[in-house]
Image (cartoon, rainbow, N blue to C red):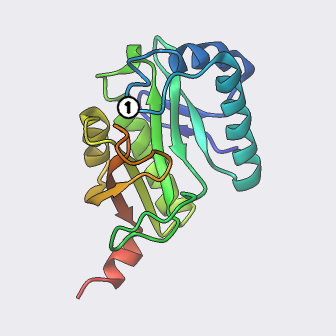
Amino acid sequence: MTVLRGERVTLRPWRDDDLAPFAALNDDPEVMQHLSGRLSREDSDAMVARIREHFDRHGFGLWALDVPGLGFAGFVGLSAQVPFEIGVPGIEPHPHEIGWRLARAAWGHGYATEAATLALRHALAHLHLPQVVSFTVPANQASQRVMQRIGLTLRGEFDHPRFPEGHRLRRHVLYAADAPDRAAAEMP
C-alpha cells in the first residue's frame, strides 16, 4: 500500500494498535458533532475493517494519519465513489470524495491541511481521478477552511440523502477540484 509523507505528517496503512485510539476519537462528541453521531467500539472497529477492505479493492482509501508527538491522530484519504448523485452542476455523477477525521489533540496545527494536500495530489496526479469532492454541513467551518486551503472550490449545496427532511445534518456544502487536464479542457 502507498505511504504518503509530508514534512510533518505520514499517511500510512492501518495497524491493529490504531483501533483503540480510533474508537476514542469516534466516541468524542466534539469530533463527531458534524457527523451522524458517536460510534461504539464495535462500530468503530467495523469501520476500520471496511477501510482496509476498500484499500484491498481499490488500492487507495482512508489512510491512518501519524503526526509528531501524537502518533495516530485520525484518518485522511479518499473514498472510491460517492454512492449517490449529488445533483450540483459540474459535478460528476458519482465522484470520489476526500475526507478527514482527526482527534481533537491534532486540531489547529495544520495537520489536516498538510495530509489532505498529500491525498489530493495523489488522487489527481497518480490515480488520475477526474474530480475529487468534499462536503460537510455549513456549520463545520473548520472543515470548510481545510477544503479551501487544499485548493477545492465551493460548487454549491445539496441535501444529503442519508438524512431525512428537516434533520440538522441534511444540508451540505460541496467543494471540488478537477484534474488539471479536465479543467483546461473545459476552459472556453
Three-letter residue code for mark 1: His
Q: Residue drawn at (29%, 35%), measured in percent from left and top?
A: 140
Q: Residue drawn at (44%, 46%), measured in percent from left and top?
A: 164
How far across and how far down the image is residue 91, in percent? 39, 69
Numbered disc 1: secondary structure: loop
Is 127 placed above or below 27 here? below
Q: Which residue is mark 1?
A: 34
Residue 17 placement, left or right of 108: right
Residue 32 placement, left or right of 49: left
Name the quadrant of the N terminus. Answer: top right
Residue sticking out furthest to the bottom: 188
Is 41 placed above or below 10 here? above
Q: Is residue 72 visible?
A: no
How far across and how far down the image is residue 104, in percent? 39, 16
Is 68 placed above or below 74 here? above
**Image quadrant in which you'd find residue 2:** top right
